[in-house]
Amino acid sequence: MTQPRWLRNVHPYGAPAEDLLLENGLFKARRPATNAPLAATDIDGQHQLLTPALVESHVHLDKTLWGQPWRPNSAGPTLKDYIANERRVLREIDAPIAHRAGALLENCIARGSLTLRCHVDIDPDFGLRHVEAMQQLRDNYRDLIDLQLVVFPQTGLISRPGTAELMREAMALGVENVGGLDPCGIDNDPIAQLDFVFKLASEFDRGVDIHLHDKGELGLWQIALIADYTERFARQGRVMISHAYCLGMLPWGQVKPLAERLAVLGISLMSSAPADCAVPPFLALREAGVNVCLGSDGIRDAWSPMGNGDMLERAMLLAFRFDLNKDEELAAAFEAATVNGARALGCKGYGLEVGQAADFLLMPVQTLGEAVVSRPVRQVYRAGRLIAANGALLDSRL
């Protein structure tokens, strides 16, 4: 139990100033801001922008080299070259997975992400070692974050003997989501992969999150197939397709009917708004009712030295990629890094309404658009308690 205290003089989503009552980690009341003197227990919001905490919808914490000495990128040109290079690099790194991932996680928290979905590699070569490390990390930061895991068969599922058994073991350990990867491009057997993924998710009542890099009409066909499986196994609202470059490669008239089906089935899309390839058409998909959220993907790893874990920056990259300049468009980009991610991840109690968790940011800007453009230093609160400021976690656990 915590004593009630008021968060004073803040602008929720840029609206007129309000005061919000915080109690037991929740928003308990809201009122228009008053001119009454601040009480000793009040938090002075100083007329800053108030928003919910950011949502990192797709990250690979176990792959990161964050905090390690700089390492020039050495990957070859193909997807399989990248995978092989990553395995070699990670074998050469002495720092434990949990230490590298923890350093990056603390950086993500300091930048305002308190809900994250992490894809975790499994493979017969190293078993469930990454999964166990991420579960240990989650336990260490449980009071600061909500961290979902996706078991990720990066080197193949059907085509890699022993992987299916490991995925089942990961479900038994409590991993929340079943992952997949390019049913055609990696496994060359889309029916077998999706049969296994959806049957496993149904058996354990878990979500599904599939990496889809396959391009053009082949990718579009696989999205339609994933929609079929979602309906057949009653996974509506619990399926994510990550990347889905193909949706940005084909005429909208060809994509639109499938987009409308995704909206009906509650299948979310995740984009990292990359600069080097086609990207799902954000505004058109949004208008069609599709929930599009944002993720960092890999951050400073063997795939790319880029990324910093700031979801406000990711929203800016989305806006930059699609030339979103109007305030309402910038606000839509902000939503992709917040409420859309929360919806995709099935979060309960997310937002600023009375009764919801007091996980929020204070930023010295006036609007959501300004926040996206300027990416200001922010104060980060978890359950009504300040946990990060000036770009750093107040209590590092490294």
Image (cartoon, grey):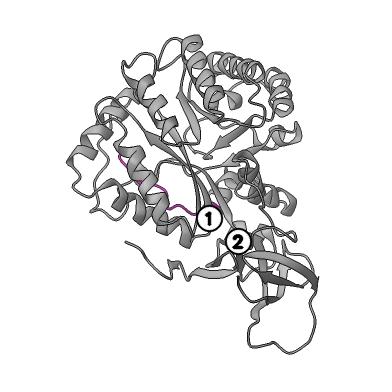
**Residue 60 visible in the current orientation:** yes
Amino acid carrying label 2: it is: Asp
Q: Which residue was labeled with disc 2?
A: 359
Image quarter hosting the N terminus: bottom right
Amino acid carrying label 1: it is: Leu
Q: Where residue 201 appears, x then y in whole percent?
A: 53, 25
Residue 358 figure quarter:
bottom right
Residue 188 figure quarter:
top left
- Residue displayed at 55% across by 27% down: 244
Q: Where residue 263 appears, x then y in whole percent?
A: 72, 29
The answer to whether mark 1 and mark 2 are in CB contact below 8 A is: yes
Q: Where residue 165 appears, x then y in whole percent?
A: 36, 21
Q: Is residue 77 above or below residue 31?
A: above
Q: Which residue was labeled with disc 1?
A: 114
Left or right, residue 314 beside residue 322: left
**First-in-chain label (1 vs 2):** 1
Closer to us: 51 or 2: 2
- Residue displayed at 47% across by 10% down: 192
Q: Which residues are magenta?
A: 301-311
